[in-house]
Amino acid sequence: MAGAIKSTSEGQTLILTISNPEFKNALGPDIYAAGIEALNAAENNPDVRSVVITGEGTVFCAGGNLQRLQANRREAPEVQAQSIEGLHNWIDSIRTYPKPVIAAVEGAAAGAGFSLALACDFVVAASNAVFVMSYSTVGLSPDGGGSWSLARALPRALASELLMGGERISAQRLHDFGLVNRVASTGDALNEALRMAGQLDARAPNALASIKELINEASANTLGQQLASERDHFVRNLHHSNGGEGIAAFLEKRTPQYR
């Protein structure tokens, strides 16, 4: 049975649940396509202000389905290349999505599942969560942007340990390195992610979209380019109705009501 993405809502937060329990929520083309479709549908929906990605049951995501990968070895290389492009399109859609995306991780986040969590803006992980780039264990190399994310966020020696050595790393250790935002009690990662989402949902959506874009641009920009981009975003947000509401609410000592 092919996996699926289940969509539900909690307030102004869209919850996308990876559902492939038979294979520990392993990923595949159907899931990539459904993930992209769900984000596209929610992007222009003002009732959706944030997204949480989680896994069904006690596992976040086991990464790629090894049985499917073994079968693809009997196909032309282009078949697997096309599948990886589907994954990469989903990863890119998460990174560029103009609303906050939070990963809620219980249990294992392995291979592309680890890469998927790293693509999100925030990671909430249960205390029992384990992250592993398991590619080298089965003679493969990373996909899903895992090498990009880890090489930029961690010391080279630790990134090499995780990517080459396939070492498992706990939620707490990733939290210590700044890759996990919050460590929740086992079984409470989704609830904690929804609490975080609720806090973000109360902020001005246009300002959060600008901040996400600025963060995404920063590593490739010179200081001068980033300063110019900050200027342009600031002016645009100041003249947005939410800018007026935020300033007025602060001066009047009341809670702002953003649209």
Image (cartoon, rainbow, N blue to C red):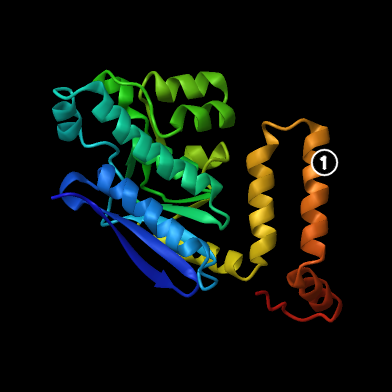
Residue named by callout 1 = 227
Residue 146, given in percent of the width and then of the height, sits at 44, 32
Which amino acid type is shown beneath numbered disc 1? Answer: Leu
Tell me the quarter of the picture where residue 190 sits. Answer: bottom left
Residue depicted at 47% across the width and 60% down the height: 51
Q: Is residue 31 visible?
A: yes
Q: Quarter of the image containing the C terminus? A: bottom right
Q: Residue at x 36, y 47 (%)?
A: 128
Residue 12: where, in percent of width, then height? 50, 72
**Residue at 18% over, 28% down:** 72
Position of residue 149 relative to residue 215, above or below, is above
Residue 40 horizontal side relative to residue 237, left or right: left
The answer to whether residue 13 is above or below residue 175 is below
Give the residue at x 17% y 34%.
68
Q: Is residue 220 left or right of residue 130?
A: right
**Mark 1 surroundings within 10 Å by alpha-carbon count, few (fewer than 14), some (14 through 19), many (20 or more):** some
Q: Position of residue 136 (x, y in %)?
A: 32, 20
Q: Position of residue 2 (x, y in %)?
A: 18, 49
User: What is the secondary structure assignment of the residue under circle 1?
Assistant: helix
The reply to whether residue 185 is in sight is no
**Residue closer to the observer: 248 or 155:** 248
Q: Nearer the viewer, residue 255 or 94?
A: 94
